[in-house]
Image (cartoon, rainbow, N blue to C red):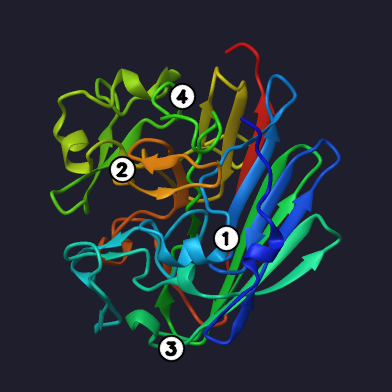
Amino acid sequence: MTYKLPNPQDFEHKIEGKNTHLIILKNRTGMQVAFTDYGARIVSILVPDQFGDLRDVVLGFNNIETYLQADEQYHGATIGRFANRIGKGSFQLDNESYTLPQNNGSNCLHGGVGFHTKVWDRQVSLEKKITFYYVSKDGEEGFPGNLKVNVSYELTESNEIIITYHAETDKKTVINLTNHAYFNLNGEGHSDVLQHILHIPSDHYLAMDENQIPLGVHSPVDGSAFDFRTPKKIVESIANEEKQLELGNGYDHTYINTQPFSLPAATAYSALSGIQLDVLTTEPGVHLYTANFLSGIDTGKSGGKYASRTAFCFETQHYPDSPNKPEFPSVVLEPGTLFESKTIYRFSVKKDN
């Protein structure tokens, strides 16, 4: 299969009066990454495989109209104001209650009609870096404060995508940002990801209730399907008869990240392509999602159907439902302080693992 970037002309559109575009970054080793200002999202990541061929390792679409109509709205997008779930669509801050949209059962998922639906402003620097800007107004989707957000993507000569988030508010609020890239290191639309080998050096993960809200305790991975401390294929444990896998219809859980930023918090490898992805982050959690709820309705860039488990996500973030869990790391942002978070997607080729 030959992979190529979408045509930029197919991303020239107008949404609520703002123009959308496809922006392409390239490095000298041949890696190419495409973005759109609709959702400040990654559209394509073309990386060399063990044969020297380029493979597109993220799911996405060839034109902006498909993104607008797709069954799955989150492909490659910047997620906010609050990534993942907030239970019962509500939280309290300084004894004031805030009500959010309930778009995932009784939960507020990914900020409701969140950042993934907005056309961001943008600035490209030296063809190696792009920064997207958005102002979320006070009360948007129920969240307090006028929030100024920017997310930058930098492509390095070491085949890294460095993602840096910044945010400031004029009123005390909560924030949790992530990128929702769906990865398939075999190449998007090629196959499922069950043969991918994952390594997650976490001793604990967050068990959840029937509404996919964390129970508030750190559960040991030892002796469970969630133990990826020794690298193993996804297929080895995803069908285990464990209650937590049943609740998520597979992996849809946050791992407690205790790795320093200099070391990977999660790694994935495809023996088929030889491509390895290392994820480094300043965030306290990495959410593993094996695309259990992709429906097969959407057709991707290379013509393949995006069905269940044809991708995986490593969503670097704070813990789900943190505003309602004071024992979790704080997600509160105060006026006069700067929110900053950094994540690196590092790609390499390993001919043997």
Q: Secondary structure at mark 3?
A: loop
In the rendered structure, which disc, 1 or 4, sits on the residue that comes first in sequence?
1
Q: Which residue is mark 3?
A: 138
Q: Mark 2 against mark 4, which lies toward the viewer? A: 4
Q: Mark 1, residues whose alpha carbon is within 10 Å: few (<14), some, or many (≥20)?
A: many
Amino acid type at circle 1 is Asn
Residue 339 locus on image (x, y percent): 56, 68
41 vs 72, left or right, is right
Quote the CA–CA distance across marks 2 and 3: 31 Å
Q: Quadrant of the N terminus?
A: top right
First of labels 2, 1 by sequence position: 1
> Residue 156: image x %, image y %?
78, 45
Is 240 rendered above or below residue 176?
A: above
Q: Residue at x 76, y 53 (%)?
A: 25
**Distance between the Cα atoms at labels 4 and 3?**
42 Å
Of the numbered discs in the image, which one, if any, rests on residue 63? 1
Q: Nearer the viewer, mark 1 or mark 4?
A: 1
Find numbered disc 4 in the image and state the secondary structure of the residue it sits on.
loop
Q: Mark 2–mark 1 contact, CB under 8 Å? A: no
Q: Which residue is mark 2?
A: 252
- Of residues 51 and 320, the one drawn nearer to the viewer in this rendering: 51
Q: Is residue 107 above or below residue 239?
A: below
Q: Height in image: 105 above or below 12?
A: above
Label for residue 196?
4
Cβ atoms at labels 3 and 1 below 8 Å apart: no
Query: Is 162 displayed left or right of 223 in the figure?
Result: right
Give the CA separation, mark 3 to mark 1.
Answer: 32 Å
